[in-house]
Image (cartoon, rainbow, N blue to C red):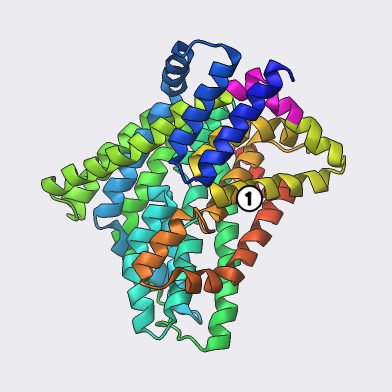
Amino acid sequence: MSIQTIAIITLLGSFALMILLRFPIAYAVGLSSVFCLLVQGSSLMDVCRLMVTGISSFSLMAVPFFITMGVFMGTGGISEKLIALANACVGWMRGGLAMVNIVASYFFGGISGSAAADTASLGSILIPMMVDEGYDADFSTAVTITSSCEGLLVPPSHNMVIYATTAGGISVGSLFLAGYLPGALLAVSLMVGSFIISAKRHYPKGEAFSIKRFFKQLRTSIWALAAIIIVVVGVVGGVFTATESAAIAVIYSLIVSVFIYKGLNWKGVWHALDEAVNTLAIVLILIATSNVFGNCLTLLHVPDMAAQAIVGLTDNRFVLIILLNVILLVLGCIMDMAPIILIATPILLPIATQYCGLDPIQFGIMIVLNCGIGLLTPPVGAVLFIGSAVGKTPMERVVKATLPFYLCMIIALLLISFIPEISMLLPNLLGS
């Protein structure tokens, strides 16, 4: 058996074993890389060098800023404003509060960029509100956790920045633009599912639509929505880079949260910064160790072997796209979002572009949505656990109530996978 084969078995075998033993993902990625390098006879100094190289990227500087912006907006009284705006838009429909939950997630996701933050912030308000109005607790929680995945697609999303860097410098502005329509498609599919269930269970309608109330809530919420405009228009228009726009957005969100909405005092600002640093530490250690893991995969030619193995099963483009989605969905059941992006992108992106004819931007949207669905599936569904805790509902009941929404999300995923225009229309239209 050659050294290369032993190294591959060591790398992937030790990684799989540690995942099964429930090691923290950063340790599993880092230690399996160290074992692989030792088998190859490499110096452990390479581990330190590769970890530093992995986070020494100007593009990745946007990640801490976007995380900080999301924390400021999430704790600064923004949630109530966006819920009121969503209620003015769709609260009049059958199952109105479910529709409000979904639309509010679309608005809030564009600010936080985090499914977990969306679930914790909006869920703590909307789930009790829905239960008081006669909605079942498990249904309310299921709507909350599934709609939270919209925030992963709607910019600014720090996961898209991670993908852009991992994929080799894809335009962050193009990825931001590409996320709007898929995010809207996901929202519509969830709204259709919610409407059908609401009509069957006779859930209540909200107040009748009022154009006056809509504009009143829009005027109140415009300060929050302007943060998205600053980031997306600034990046796409070439006014500043993604990193510069993120830094500006942090200052803007701080001013809005403290001085306009007054949802944060200066003591709260320090707590928000502490939360942002804790989140950032997890993300950066994952990026650093995943760079070592990715380097091992590349040196061992694992991406080429994987491509040949998958393509060897079939040369049908449609079947290959489904296989890629299945692989990502399975990974999402056992791993968190960031490591999937960091590890799977170098392996699967060449297959997607060369054999499936997918644009790297379209494939990025597919990865993000697949990972989002993975956040809702046991055993490592972080958002599922958060939603269960916020909704005070057993996880088993939440999973059962989520089954119809899984179907809605899979339909949206397949449409995004096979209709490139859903992801590529805005980037192509605006020439990004």
Q: Would you say residue 174 is visible in this rendering?
A: no
Residue 84 vs residue 276, the one in the foreground: 276
Residue 321 position, x and y percent, is 75, 45
In-image side of 216 versus 369 (left or right): left
Residue at the farthest front position:
1
Query: Who's the residue at 56% across and 45% down the image?
Result: 368
Task: Name above or below for residue 422 compared with residue 406.
Answer: above
Task: Name above or below for residue 375 compared with residue 15.
Answer: below
Query: Who's the residue at 53% across and 29% down the image?
Result: 32
Residue 148 vs residue 230, the one in the foreground: 148
How packed mark 1 is, by other alpha carbons closer than 10 Å (few <14, some 14-19, many 20 or more), is some
Q: Quadrant of the C terminus?
A: top right
Task: Name above or below for residue 189 compared with residue 228.
Answer: below
**Residue 119 highlighted magenta (yes or no):** no
Residue 131 position, x and y percent, is 37, 80
Q: Quadrant of the N terminus?
A: top right
Residue 198 position, x and y percent, is 53, 82
Task: Name above or below for residue 225 compared with residue 281.
Answer: below
Q: Which three-letter amino acid code belongs to the residue tagged 1? A: Val
Instruction: Return the residue at label 1.
Output: 330
Residue 369 position, x and y percent, is 58, 50
**Residue 303 highlighted magenta (yes or no):** yes
Range covered by the magenta-colored residues: 295-305
The quarter of the picture where residue 357 lies is top right
Query: Who's the residue at 48% across and 85% down the image?
Result: 203
Q: Would you say residue 21 is visible in this rendering?
A: yes
The quarter of the picture where residue 311 lies is top right
In-image side of 99 versus 7 (left or right): left
Query: Who's the residue at 61% across and 34% down the image?
Result: 13
Q: Secondary structure at mark 1?
A: helix
